[in-house]
Image: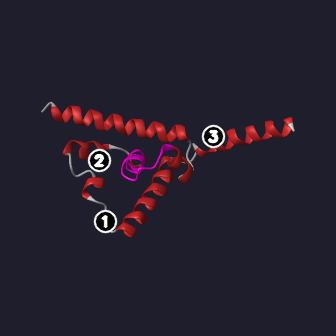
Amino acid sequence: MAHHHDVSSCLARFVARMRDRVSDDICAARIERYLAKGALEDGQLSREAAGDADPDINEAVARMDALTRGILILVVSQKMSVSEVARRFRMSEERVCRHFRRAVEMVAMGREDGSCN
């Protein structure tokens, strides 16, 4: 039994490592397809979900790469947890957290820059 436990833990680590080897473009495309499918089912995204309320936030979001922006939308607008995003789009939780933190930092910097004008 101990050997079986060692093999399963090695396999779990291998799968987690392989999830992070999928390129950002592929992960971003998966997220974009998911969001497009949801938008078609719901009609259009609401103005609030699209971030039309604050131009500083819009500018910060526009500067993000596709994966970071997609993860931000999933967590904030779709109210998905980091673990849900990781599981649904076959990414590690660490990778999702890293992109989400980067998105939050970019939005915060954008708000700081906009309020100083």
| Quadrant of the image occupied by residue 14 | top right
Residue at the spot 76% in from the left edge and 41% down from the top edge: 8
44 in relation to 100, above or below: below
* Residue 91 shown left or right of residue 44 in the figure: right
Name the amino acid, label 3: Arg
x and y, in percent, of residue 114 in the image: 18, 36
x and y, in percent, of residue 20 in the image: 57, 42
Which numbered disc covers residue 17? 3
Name the amino acid, label 2: Ala
Name the amino acid, label 1: Gln
Dominant SS type (magenta): helix
Mark 2 and mark 1 lie on one chain; the one further toward the N terminus is: 1
Depth check: 80 or 22 in front?
Answer: 80
- Considering the numbered disc 3 on the image, is that residue within a helix, a strand or a loop? helix
* Residue 48 shown left or right of residue 33 in the figure: left
Mark 3 and mark 2 lie on one chain; the one further toward the N terminus is: 3
Which residue carries the number 2 mark?
62
* Residue 3 shown left or right of residue 79 in the figure: right
x and y, in percent, of residue 9 in the image: 74, 38
Q: CA distance from mark 2 to mark 1?
A: 19 Å
- Considering the numbered disc 2 on the image, is that residue within a helix, a strand or a loop? helix
Q: Which residues are magenta?
A: 68-82
Residue at the spot 28% in from the left edge and 59% down from the top edge: 46
Q: Are marks 3 and 2 in contact (CB under 8 Å)?
A: no
Which residue carries the number 1 mark?
44
Q: CA distance from mark 3 to mark 2?
A: 30 Å
User: Mark 2, mark 1: which one is toward the viewer?
Assistant: 1
Depth check: 19 or 1 in front?
Answer: 1
Residue at the spot 39% in from the left edge and 36% down from the top edge: 102
